[in-house]
Image (cartoon, helix red, strand yellow):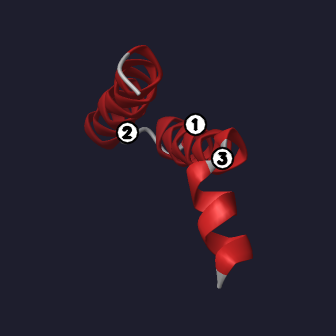
Amino acid sequence: GARMIRFIEGPFFTYTIMTLYVLRCVTYAYGSHWGRASYWLCALGITISAEFLMKKWP
């Protein structure tokens, strides 16, 4: 319950998602799926931007 919510609101959750994006991107890049790799990089950029905006305007 509360512990899970604290985890989701904490910075660790964001880093976990960002790491998953990077790993997925690397996997696709090695599989020569550059369209998918760029898609995941875009998603990673959106995640970073959202995190930055949430910190700027709490």
At 57% from the left and 37% from the top, the residue drawn is 22
Residue 41 point in image, percent of width and height: 39, 29
Q: Farthest top residue?
A: 56
Q: Give the mark count.
A: 3
* Mark nearer the N terminus (2 vs 1): 1
- The residue under label 1 is 22
Residue 6 point in image, percent of width and height: 67, 61
| Distance between the alpha carbons at the discs numbered 2 and 3 | 22 Å
Task: Give the amino acid at mark 1.
Answer: Val
Q: In this view, does 7 lie above or below 44?
A: below
- The label nearer to you, 3 versus 1, is 3
Quadrant housing residue 18? top right
Disc sitting over residue 40 in the figure: 2
At 67% from the left and 76% from the top, the residue drawn is 2
Query: Quarter holding the C terminus?
Result: top left
Task: Give the amino acid at mark 2.
Answer: Trp
Label 1: few (<14), some (14–19) or many (≥20) C-alpha neighbours in 10 Å: some
- The residue under label 3 is 10
The front one of 41 and 56 is 56
